[in-house]
Image: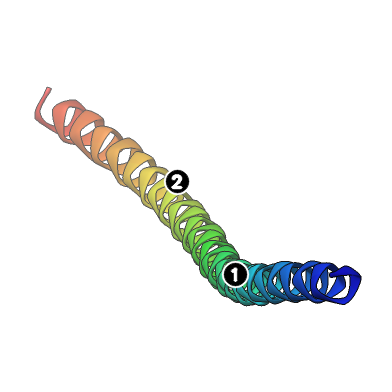
Amino acid sequence: MQKERETEILHALNLEVKGISETLHEKQKSLGLFNSDIEAMIEAKKSDYIEWLNKQASAKNEKQYLLQQLAQQEHKNAKLDMENEKFLTERMDITAKKWNIHS
C-alpha cells in the first residue's frame, strides 16, 4: 500500500515535471522569437536612421549649392547693375552734349 502510494506520487510528480518542461520549452521558444523580432526591429530602425541621415545630408548639400548659386547670381546682378549705371551716365552725358550742340 505504501509502495502504491509512493508510485502514484512519483507518477504525479513526473507528470508535473513533464508539464513544467513543456511550458518551459514553449516559453524559451517564445523568447527566441521575441528576441528575433527585437533584433529585426533594431536592424529596421538602424536602416531607417541611416536613410534619414542620408536625406538630411543631401538636403544640406542642396541648400549649400543653392546658396552658392544665389551668391553668384547676386554678384552677377550687381556687376550688371554697375555696368548699366555706367551706360546710363554715358547716355545722359551724350544727350546733354547733343542738346548743347543744338542749342
Q: Which residue is mark 1?
A: 30
Q: Nearer the viewer, residue 40 or 34?
A: 34
Tell me the quarter of the image containing the N terminus.
bottom right
Q: CA distance from mark 1 to mark 2?
A: 71 Å
Residue 92, image x and y in percent?
26, 33
Quick one: label 2, few (<14), some, or many (20+) residues within 10 Å? few
The residue depicted at 49 percent of the width and 59 percent of the height is: 59
Measured from the top left, where is residue 24 in percent x and y?
71, 71
Picture coordinates of residue 99 (x, y %)? Answer: 15, 27
Question: Image point 20% across, 27% down: which residue?
Answer: 100
When asked about the image quadrant of residue 7, the answer is bottom right
Q: How many marks?
A: 2
Q: Where, by quadrant of the figure, is residue 18 drawn? A: bottom right
Left or right placement of residue 31 versus residue 75 in this view: right
Q: Amino acid at mark 2?
A: Ala
In the depicted structure, whether residue 23 falls above or below residue 68: below
Pick out the residue farthest to the top: 103
Which image quarter holds the C terminus?
Answer: top left
Density class for disc 1 (Cα within 10 Å; few <14, some 14-19, many ≥20) is: few
| Mark 1 vs 2, N-terminal side | 1
Q: Residue under circle 2?
A: 78
